[in-house]
Image (tube, rainbow, N blue to C red):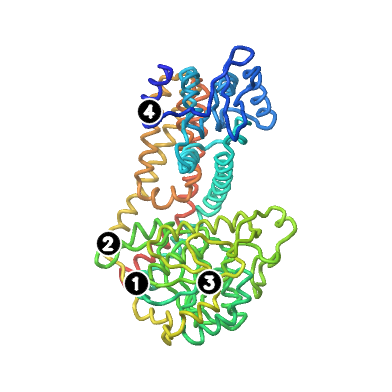
């Protein structure tokens, strides 16, 4: 290895250096050969399946590298707001060409072959690359390194991500290549969904939690009151997938004979009511107002027998005029409950992780309640005969459109066949799979005919489960309605203390805002007067004001969670602002970014003020009650 590379890796990537040293102790490079090209450069020959492949041109690798970057420029617009991943390094010719053309664009290097990476380090000087722009350098020692790389990348980089692959790698390292690009696509899709979810729901979550606190303080906490109470019992989690239509009579038989507890999620409540089957409970966690439509039929019919288990961050209008009993669970999005509430004995409250699908959240709930077996019904998470939903749901298009079919992706179903699904359904499936992995000893059976295969579950048809294991009555005459006689009691003294502290933090937040704006005004004057030394000193003061915001309880509980996307954008941009060499440009970026952020926060403080006062009244009434 080149001496410069040894020093570079020891300083910047010590763990990677150790791995390479261990690799060097082995006899690697067995099927690789370094060869001279016709223009006296080097290329790597790889012997695979009795064929020879060259990672670079045998004639002119540099010209080939220029062609790779030219093709990249034809399809992508590249600037300092881009981040380029080089998949497959070879001897780095294309990386050198790119670094010379784009000295201000950040990049990452990923090599799937230990052998090739050793040749790369033997022949390419990393110190000649713009090391300030090199964000991640990773060598794939095991398949898990793909996930490690992508997790680091998408947590660290907040720019447009572009991949440049060395073309021959698709043939030479085919399985690794397919795995990387498949996972990259999944990560991109997941990031878009998460970003969209956070951006569209960030304010709703907090406003709902503030509005719902009154309901939380006047209803039982089902997790606290019934934790582990349903041991040796079975729960059926019913979703609104098209296969639900086939299970109606099986569910009716189960309900009539008390063979299991039936929990409805999402629109399934309407299919069940349509067929005159009342589940033991229905769940709600969706923060959006549009989700009210789910309970319209139940409210119109004034059905009181079905209790609602709501997440504390659920849309507050969903709870209004709900005719049945209500029980709550505190969700991880609820910074308000986490700040104000403790159990009467002073212990921490149980929290259910919020999820993009109510089924995933309810799965956690059933686990915490202690159910021995959880059966999924109607959890298709895919299209069946071009249907997305079961019958009896009037407010959705049950059959997919031609455009939706064109955009659909293929996944495996419970029988091993290919079925079409959407990116949204696929994301939900993975979310459910992740919770199944996280919850120890959870026993989940997927009884969804023709549904997507869910890892961690066993597929058994519902009729076979009834014949095999659902033999005895396990429900009582009250179902979950017995909970009403046990109302959760939260610690009033603790809540009163936290309420006083929050009022102080609110006043302090208003003071911080003024100081923050004053520093920004001074920075703007300094930049306009070309007084860059003064501006640099003021940046330190601005950083202190931002830290005050981060440590202020009112901001931490209400305002930062409401602006989590904008806050992350600001945090991610600070590093690039610090790297800006032009002091005038640096000042303008600081003023724009920090001004935009504080203006949004000030507007939101004003917006939540009446809701905050209403919430304080609910707290006062609870404490006095």
Query: Where's the N terminus, which quadrant?
Result: top left
Q: Earlier in the sequence, mark 2 or mark 3?
A: 3
Residue 262 rendering spot, x and y as whole percentages = 49, 77
Between the C-alphas of marks 2 and 4, the distance is 61 Å
Q: Give the numbered dot on residue 228.
A: 1
User: Which badge, 2 or 1, is on the more N-terminal residue?
Assistant: 1
Tell me what residue is drawn at x 56 percent, y 63 percent.
289
Circle 3 residue = 460
Q: CA distance from mark 2 to mark 1?
A: 26 Å
Label whose residue precedes the other's in the sequence (4 or 3): 4
| 184 relative to 503 in the view: left or right | right
- Up/down of 295 relative to 526, above or below: below
Q: Which residue was labeled with disc 4?
A: 25
Q: Which secondary structure lies at badge 3?
A: loop
Q: Which mark is residue 286?
A: none
Please say if 231 is above or below 86. below
Mark 1 residue element: loop
Q: Quadrant of the C terminus?
A: bottom left
Q: Nearer the viewer's eye, disc 2 or disc 3? A: 3
In the image, residue 482 lies at what x, y percent?
39, 82
Q: Which residue is at the front of the view, 345 or 149?
A: 149
Q: Residues within 10 Å of mark 1 (few under 14, many from 20)?
A: some
Residue hosting label 2 = 494
Q: Of the two numbered discs 3 and 1 on the same chain, state the one appearing first in sequence.
A: 1
* Image location of residue 490, percent across then percent down: 31, 68
Compute the Cα span from label 2 to label 3: 48 Å
């Amino acid at each position: 290895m080149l001496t410069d590379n040894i020093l570079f890796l020891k300083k910047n990537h010590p763990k990677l250096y150790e791995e390479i040293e261990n690799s060097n102790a082995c006899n690697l490079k067995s099927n690789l050969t370094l060869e001279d090209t016709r223009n006296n450069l080097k290329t790597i020959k790889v012997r695979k399946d009795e064929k020879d492949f060259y990672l670079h041109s045998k004639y002119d690798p540099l010209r080939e590298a220029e062609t790779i970057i030219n093709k990249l420029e034809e399809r992508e617009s590249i600037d300092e707001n881009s981040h380029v991943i080089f998949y497959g390094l070879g001897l780095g010719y294309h990386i050198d060409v790119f670094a010379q053309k784009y000295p201000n664009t950040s990049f990452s290097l990923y090599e799937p072959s230990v052998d090739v990476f050793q040749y790369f380090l033997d022949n390419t000087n990393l110190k000649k690359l713009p090391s300030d722009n090199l964000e991640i350098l990773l060598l794939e020692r095991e398949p898990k390194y793909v996930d490690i790389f992508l997790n680091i990348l998408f947590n660290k980089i907040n720019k447009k991500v572009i991949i440049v692959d060395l073309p021959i790698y698709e043939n030479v390292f085919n399985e690794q290549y397919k795995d990387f690009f498949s996972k990259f696509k999944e990560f991109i899709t997941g990031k878009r969904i998460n970003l969209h979810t956070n951006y569209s729901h960030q304010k709703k979550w907090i406003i709902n939690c503030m509005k719902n606190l009154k309901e939380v303080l006047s209803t039982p906490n089902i997790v606290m009151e019934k934790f582990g109470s349903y041991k040796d019992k079975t729960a059926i989690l019913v979703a609104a997938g098209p296969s639900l239509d086939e299970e109606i009579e099986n569910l009716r038989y189960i309900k009539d004979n008390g063979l299991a507890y039936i929990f409805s999620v999402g629109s399934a409540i309407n299919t069940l009511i349509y067929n005159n089957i009342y589940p033991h409970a229905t769940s709600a966690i969706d923060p959006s107002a549009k989700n009210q439509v789910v309970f319209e039929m139940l409210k119109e019919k004034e059905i009181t027998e079905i209790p609602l288990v709501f997440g504390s961050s659920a849309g507050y209008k969903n709870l209004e005029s709900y005719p049945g009993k209500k029980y709550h669970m505190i969700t991880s999005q609820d910074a308000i409950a986490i700040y104000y509430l403790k159990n009467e004995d002073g212990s921490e409250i149980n929290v259910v992780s919020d999820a993009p699908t109510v089924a995933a959240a309810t799965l956690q709930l059933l686990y915490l309640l202690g159910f021995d077996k959880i059966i999924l019904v109607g959890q298709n998470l895919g299209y069946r005969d071009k249907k997305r939903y079961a019958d009896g749901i009037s407010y959705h298009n049950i059959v997919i459109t031609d455009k939706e079919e064109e955009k659909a992706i293929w996944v495996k179903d419970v029988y091993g066949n290919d079925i079409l699904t959407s990116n949204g359904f696929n994301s939900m499936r993975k979310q459910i799979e992740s919770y199944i992995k996280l919850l120890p000893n959870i026993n989940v059976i997927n009884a969804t005919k023709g549904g997507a295969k869910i890892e961690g579950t066993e597929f058994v048809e519902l009729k076979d489960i009834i014949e095999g294991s659902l033999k005895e009555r396990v429900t009582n005459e009250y179902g979950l309605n017995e909970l009403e006689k046990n109302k959760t009691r939260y610690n009033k003294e603790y809540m009163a203390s936290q309420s006083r502290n929050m009022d102080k933090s609110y006043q302090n937040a208003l003071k911080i805002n003024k100081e923050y704006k004053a520093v920004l005004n001074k920075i703007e004057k300094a930049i306009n007067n070309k007084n860059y030394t003064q501006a640099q000193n003021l940046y330190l003061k601005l950083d202190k004001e931002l830290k005050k915001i981060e440590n202020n309880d009112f901001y931490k509980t209400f305002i930062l969670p409401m602006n989590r996307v904008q806050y992350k954008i600001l945090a991610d941009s600070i590093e690039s602002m610090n790297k800006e060499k032009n002091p005038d440009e640096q000042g303008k970026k600081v003023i724009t970014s920090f001004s935009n952020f504080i203006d949004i926060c000030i507007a939101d403080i004003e917006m939540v003020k009446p809701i905050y006062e209403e919430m304080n009244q609910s707290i006062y009434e609870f404490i006095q009650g």
